[in-house]
Image (cartoon, rainbow, N blue to C red):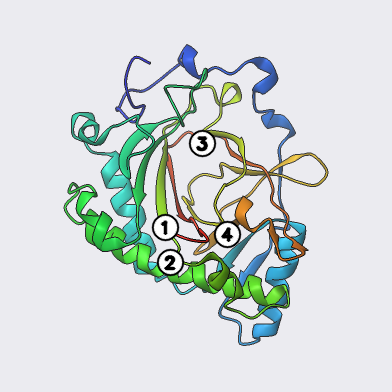
Amino acid sequence: MDTKVISSGVHYTNLPASYVRPESERPRLSEVSTCEDVPVIDLGCQDRNQIVQQVGDACEHYGFFQVINHGVSLEAVEKMLGVAHDFFSLPVEEKLKLYSDDPSKTMRLSTSFNVNKEKVHNWRDYLRLHCYPLDKYVPEWPSNPPPFKEIVRSYCIQVRELGFRIQELISESLGLEKDHIKNVLGEQGQHMAVNFYPPCPEPELTYGLPAHTDPNALTILLQDLSAAGLQVLLKDGKWAAVNPHPDAFVINIGDQLQVVEEAVIVVFLRSWTDTSPKSSLNSSSVCEMMAAVG
């Protein structure tokens, strides 16, 4: 790679060769439909039984859903998106102070996925943060932009609470006590990836992120409304785009919750393509949901 990150301010007119995927691995954008029936669940509904039923149906048939009236304040969301944009707008020299290609680091700016091992790179930069316990990890977070730590800290607290609510609803949808998943998983970690996708000159040749499932239990995804890059592989074997819903989070069921007790929860492959002429962001707060922490 000519530069360590692609959020360098350079306007690319052609895709660098290191990002061009073999023809058999390229996104077939013309074949991607729009997922019209993504479940949108109103967590503010007064009928809890209805919410539990909707969550159970979404987990069984989709493996993901969107939630509105979720308890994370609009102010927290707007500030999170704002400070993320401000971070990636910093001079590249400032951002590179945080760069690392060491995946064991608990805070780092990096690019693609694993640049040291992969043959073809992905069209994204990302800021990776560990978020729990906050007292341990906040001191190592970026100090520039100046409000970054406080804004992200407040956002993480609210999103963590949302994660616990989702766990309770999933437990109840399986006919279990609401604290069942929380008790089984024990102490739960949390980390965040803030993904930045610059305008891609040839989106038909590459991915922001290729097809994957999430290894954790839950991913709570905040999408940039300016771009619909999230795609999911449906049961019919076709890829479909998930358009951002205003004031919503996408809840993605990870591998760790694929099977709870004897109830099967569907896990779908997902990818991210960069078709927007503008830069886009997404933020996923990922709870590791480990059964035990040493």
Residue topped by disc 3: 276
Q: Residue at x 39, y 35 (%)?
A: 103
Q: Residue at x 49, y 52 (%)?
A: 225
Name the image quarter holding residue 124.
Answer: top left
Tell me: residue 242, above or below residue 72.
above
Residue topped by disc 1: 190
Residue topped by disc 2: 160
Q: Amino acid at mark 1?
A: Gln
Name the image quarter holding residue 156.
Answer: bottom left
Is tag 4's residue or tag 3's residue first in the polypeptide sequence?
4
Tell me: residue 7, above or below residue 80.
above
Label 2 sits on a secondary structure element that is: helix
Q: Amino acid at mark 4?
A: Ile
Neighbourhood count class around disc 1 (C-alpha, 10 Å): few under 14, some 14–19, many 20 upward: many
Q: Residue at x 53, y 22 (%)?
A: 202
Is tag 4's residue or tag 2's residue first in the polypeptide sequence?
2
Measure the C-alpha gap from mark 2 to mark 1: 8 Å
Residue topped by disc 4: 251
**Disc nearest the viewer among 4 and 1:** 1
